[in-house]
Amino acid sequence: MAERYVYPLVLYKEKSPCGDIWIGNFPGLNGCWAEDKSREKVLASAPYVLHEYASACRELGWPLPGAPSLDELEEAGVGEVFVIKEAEVS
């Protein structure tokens, strides 16, 4: 497998009519996010979500987008920032 893709994830909680929900968003990767009622499940699934996104880009011959600045994401205060490494899937 090629080098695994690494990208920041912004994790935050939103209120919904069905209760609180955790959302992990990869800013700048359109349509790339994870959500669940459990914070831990979002963090556990994020590497696989990133893998699916990166795999689709590779298959289509699209370049993988560069990551936004961690400092800027943290300064924006929109949620917790984590660095996620693409899952290795065989």
Image (cartoon, rainbow, N blue to C red):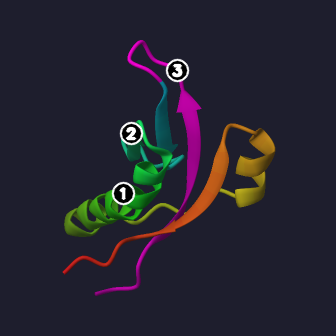
Labelled pair 2, 3 in contact (Cβ < 8 Å): no
Indicate the position of residue 85 as horizontal and vertical percent values: 47, 71
Q: Which mark is residue 15?
A: 3
Counting every numbered tag in the picture gives 3
Q: On the picture, is 78 further left or further right than 16?
A: right
Q: Is residue 8 magenta?
A: yes
Q: Secondary structure at mark 1?
A: helix
Whichever of labels 1 and 2 marks the residue nearer the N terminus, that label is: 2
Residue located beneath label 2 in the image: 36
In magenta, the rendered stretch is 1-19
Indicate the position of residue 56 as horizontal and vertical percent values: 24, 60
> Whole-Å distance between the Cαs marked 1 and 2?
10 Å
For badge 3, the amino acid type reads Lys
Depicted 2 relative to depicted 32: above or below: below
Depicted 78 relative to depicted 26: above or below: above
On-image quarter of the N terminus: bottom left
Viewer-side residue, 31 vs 16: 16
> Whole-Å distance between the Cαs marked 1 and 3?
21 Å
Q: Which mark is residue 45?
A: 1
For badge 2, the amino acid type reads Asp
| Residue 67 visible in the picture | no
Q: Quadrant of residue 76?
A: top right
Q: Which mark is residue 86?
A: none
Depicted 20 relative to depicted 65: above or below: above
Indicate the position of residue 43 as horizontal and vertical percent values: 47, 56
On-image quarter of the C terminus: bottom left
